[in-house]
Image (cartoon, grey):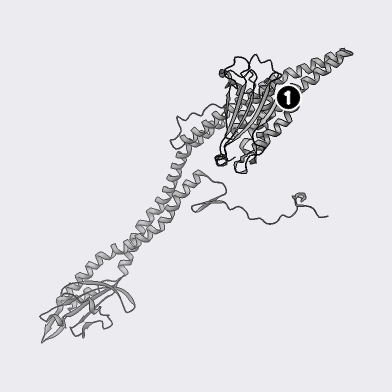
């Protein structure tokens, strides 16, 4: 039987999937990013790459250093040999003494070659295979020049000059002396060895010092980690940032800010749970008492007890629903999906659903505003939360409006900017100015109203309004009255474009 992918066993062969490549830093690879390892890589990688380059540069420098003394010796030998060039009967001659010949052959390491040519290029003396310099490089008599060349398949260093011995400038004698490069290479090799051997000792020592320096530099982070791990689960006090490095201070400050917000959140949750338990205790106690009375009652007493039980259960259900609505508004908000919302439709539906309750209290409940908001004025929002906002405002107005009163829900739309205002007003007792900020807190209820409620309605409205970037205002419906001033609650939503920019 063929199984769906969701029913496939984990023991079944799985298709090959490309593995996630490990993070790569410098010349090394790690599966998990390490700040210590990353800094170490970026410090050692250039060091290891520059070391071979330094050896190459040292080789070229050593070649130059090794060539200078031997070039001077070669120039000296050339100038010494020019003393044996003479002119007799208009012909150039080179009379090399036996001592001079022995001097040329005194070196056991390198070979020395020489050559003498007259102004017409005829060989006067020396090695006939000796290459001649470029004619374009011919210069002043007595000036010594150096070049690299090949004689008898040997790499040589050549020193040459033009000698004038009573001849015209056009009939100069070319004198060349060449020496193989054995001593130069040997000296350059010795210089390289003298440089490389210390580097083989210094490089590991430098790596060790870099590693120790990083260990010491990272130690404050390890100390901070130990301090955090040693804290108790309920310890939300700020972390002491007095002994942390300057670079870590912003991180510690951010953690302290997070701890402060977490502390406030935990405090609010504890307060919320305590208040919720207190609010649910009364109806539950009433249910228990009425149930005990019903067990010992008969006839009409049982009927009255059942009515009280039903009333207490309705109150408990309403309180639980309000608590759930407040929790949903506080914990979800922007994370819920948003769609273009027609505020007028939501308000009309809430008013229609509240008509039976209004009729039971003989309250005139009505709606003022457009049947539908223009499409260009639809605002992004969460329909569930906005519907909860409207229903809480309408329910709150009905609860606090006396029998025979009037409750009006109104939607105002600016066709140019798309801004919308929701107003719910009544002619009840109203809320004193000094208590209007307090009634937005959960479970706060104005004294002297004698109205059964949970004190969560306006807190839910305020939370949902903040989630949608709206502002909430309260004012008297009839400011001049001392009794029945009423209350008008206005929720002002911004333009649709502005709300879209905030993520709603």
Instruction: Name the residue located 21 percent from the left edge and 70 percent from the top edge.
Output: 75
The one nearer the camera, 172 or 301, is: 301
Quarter of the image where one finds residue 15: bottom right
Question: Who's the residue at 30% across and 75% down the image?
Answer: 149
User: Left or right: 142 with respect to 444?
Assistant: left
Residue that label 1 marks: 358
Q: Is residue 338 visible?
A: no
Q: Nearer the viewer, residue 22 or 276?
A: 276
Percent position of residue 412, x then y: 60, 34
Q: In the structure shown, which secondary structural element does the residue marked by tag 1 occupy?
A: helix
Q: Position of residue 147 (x, y in %)?
A: 27, 72
**What residue sits 38% from the left and 61% below the top?**
56
Of the 4 image quadrants, the one containing the C terminus is top right
Q: Is 357 displayed left or right of 89 in the figure?
A: right
Q: Quadrant of the N terminus?
A: bottom right
In the rendered view, tell whether residue 62 sits above or below residue 12. Answer: below
């Amino acid at each position: 039987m063929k199984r769906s992918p969701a029913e496939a066993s984990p023991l079944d062969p799985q298709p090959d999937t490309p593995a996630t490549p490990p993070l790569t830093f410098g010349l090394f690879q790690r599966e998990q990013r390490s700040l210590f390892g990353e800094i170490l890589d970026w410090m050692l990688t250039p060091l290891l790459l520059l070391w071979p380059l330094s050896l190459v540069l040292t080789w070229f420098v050593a070649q130059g250093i090794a060539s200078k003394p031997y070039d001077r010796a070669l120039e000296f030998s050339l100038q010494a040999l020019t003393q044996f060039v003479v002119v007799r009967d208009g012909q150039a001659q080179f009379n090399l003494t036996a001592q001079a010949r022995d001097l040329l052959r005194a070196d056991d390491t390198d070979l020395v070659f020489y050559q003498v040519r007259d102004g017409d290029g005829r060989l006067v003396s020396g090695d006939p295979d000796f290459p001649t310099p470029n004619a374009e490089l011919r210069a002043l008599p007595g000036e010594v020049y150096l070049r690299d060349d090949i004689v008898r398949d040997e790499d040589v260093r050549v020193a040459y000059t033009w000698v004038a011995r009573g001849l015209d400038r056009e009939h100069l004698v070319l004198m060349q002396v060449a020496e193989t490069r054995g001593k130069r290479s040997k000296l350059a090799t010795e210089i390289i060895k003298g440089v490389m051997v210390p580097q083989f000792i210094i490089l590991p020592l430098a790596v060790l010092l870099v590693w120790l320096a990083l260990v010491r530099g990272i130690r404050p982070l390890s100390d901070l980690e130990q301090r955090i791990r040693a804290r108790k689960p309920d310890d939300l006090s700020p972390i002491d940032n007095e002994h942390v490095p300057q670079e870590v201070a912003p991180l510690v400050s951010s953690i302290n800010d997070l701890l402060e917000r977490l502390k406030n959140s935990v405090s609010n949750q504890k307060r919320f749970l305590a208040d919720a338990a207190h609010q649910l205790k009364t109806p539950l106690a009433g249910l228990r008492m009425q149930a005990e009375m019903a067990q010992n009652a008969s006839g009409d007493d049982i009927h009255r007890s059942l009515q009280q039980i039903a009333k207490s259960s309705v109150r408990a259900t309403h309180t639980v629903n309000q608590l759930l609505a407040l929790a949903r508004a506080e914990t979800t908000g922007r994370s819920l999906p948003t769609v273009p919302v027609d505020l007028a439709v939501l308000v009309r539906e809430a008013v229609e659903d509240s008509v039976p309750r209004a009729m039971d209290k003989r309250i005139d409940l009505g709606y003022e505003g457009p049947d539908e908001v223009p499409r260009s004025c639809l605002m992004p929002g969460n329909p569930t939360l906005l519907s909860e906002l409207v229903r809480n405002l309408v329910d709150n107005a009905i609860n606090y409006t006396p029998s025979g009163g009037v409750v009006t829900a109104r939607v105002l739309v600016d066709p140019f900017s798309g801004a919308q205002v929701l107003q719910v007003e009544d002619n009840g007792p109203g809320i004193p100015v000094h208590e209007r900020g307090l009634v937005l807190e959960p479970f706060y209820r104005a004294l002297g109203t004698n109205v059964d409620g949970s004190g969560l309605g306006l807190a839910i409205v305020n939370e949902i309004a903040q989630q949608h970037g709206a502002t909430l205002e309260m004012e008297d419906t009839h400011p001049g009255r001392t009794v029945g001033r009423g209350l008008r609650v206005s929720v002002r939503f911004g333009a649709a474009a502005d709300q879209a920019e905030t993520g709603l």
